[in-house]
Amino acid sequence: MRAVQKHPTVITLEPLFKFTHKRMCQTPREKLVHLCDQSRGPSLLSRIVHDTTPVLAGKSLDRMNRQMLQQLLPLIDDMGNYETIDLNAWLRHAITIVSTNVTYGNLNPFQNRHVEDTFWELERNVALLLTNIVPWLIAPKTWKARKCLCAAFKDYFDLTGYEDGSDLLAMRYRSFLRAGLTHKEIAYAEVPLIVGLLTNTVPAAFWVHFELFSRPKLLEEIRGEVEQNALDIAPDGTHIIDLGYLRDDCPLLLSMYQEVLRIRTTMVTIRFVTQDVVLADNYFLRSGAMLFMPAKQLGRHQSAWGTSADEFDGRRFLRSTTTIDDNGDKKKGPRRTGGFMAFGVSPTICPGRHFSTSEILALVAMIALRYDIAPVDRLWHAPLRVNSATTSNMGPVEGRFPVTVKKRQKYEGKPWQFKTTDGKGQFGLAVG
């Protein structure tokens, strides 16, 4: 992996942008040529991807986080009104509506539940669209779902919904409009963004809740950490969780989250070889080859993670070299991150990782403090994963996962609120 990173201009993602827009976005050939033109440097598609990073950082990220927290709160409040919920469906709806509202603003098409359901029908087999083998015949439901989703987004752009959207959306819209794309073509170009926004965040949120609530000792420790370091009680009795303190002062929570990603990811990072190259003075790769780096295998390789590579260790990502395992026993070991590829491989790292991390940790922190959650049969058995052509690399759950929800007596009847401090939106996440 390190040898690959030494050749970022030779081993690159650039061909993937063209491939995706041709097959998933149905961009017309003549406009695709313009979007992929590299005669004057990086292509427009490459620049759009590059420009995504700054609009998901700084003041833009602060604004998105404030809106996200404001919209999560009533959903978490409402959770306590039910004795049982389908945890998988609840998290999917919460993250879908909050993430898309923050991105698309007041005219967000996902506010129509039919559009939300249409997207998840598309997501189940979205990879079949990339094969481009008569997809309207081999995947008619997926083909129709994309058509319906993009029709809703064409209406959104026609109604100037982008004027109330995020900086991310504004950047993409201006770029595609300058490239000559119509509103219908821009609507299709939004599909990869929505896929990236939701398809990994939703199952990641599920597995974080699953792994945490199924470990009572770890759950109590993280509850204590959040209470001590990120919870403030206002004079009027409002209990306030500060996202900035979750980021800076709750290292066990952040470590547990990254360990869930390490254990659960099935990502295979793809790069394209654009020139003949020799890696590490030993491996010859010919121009035109595709290079696959499986995160699942590297994320559990003993050379990177030691003899406990296959075990879940919520403290693995703590910076201290002396750690205590879930049984309270001390152990020593370096903080290894070289095999961690859940956010991609440098220099191409997921630009939305800080927003999705904020969303998931805000969710789990407040839910953990306010509620006790357990499967209706009291047994924490991992549910089946979706067995279809999804592009998600976090093992989305197949079907229902019913749980009981009980308000914790300690906080029952207390008012709650989120807050965040501007400029503290980026987490100290490990990257490969």
Image (cartoon, rainbow, N blue to C red):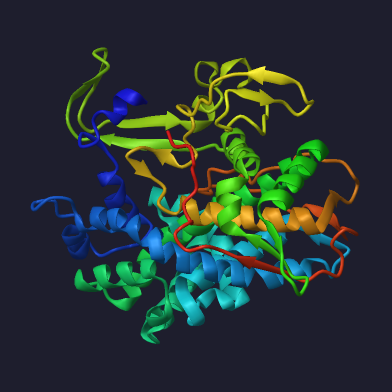
Residue 25's place in the image compared with 303, above or below, is below
Which quadrant holds the N terminus?
A: top left
- Is residue 199 in view from this perspective? no
Query: x%, y% of residue 102?
Result: 50, 70
The quadrant where residue 329 appears: top right
Query: x%, y% of residue 213?
Result: 78, 45
Relative side of 364 to 388, left or right: right
Relative side of 330 to 152, left or right: right
Relative side of 12 to 336, left or right: left
Query: x%, y% of residue 85?
Result: 81, 61
Residue 259's place in the image compared with 232, above or below, is above
Residue occupying the far front of the picture: 235
The residue sitting at 20% across, 34% down in the picture is: 10
Query: x%, y% of residue 81?
Result: 84, 70
Which quadrant holds the C terminus?
A: top left
The residue sitting at 44% across, 37% down in the picture is: 431
The residue sitting at 87% across, 65% down in the picture is: 412
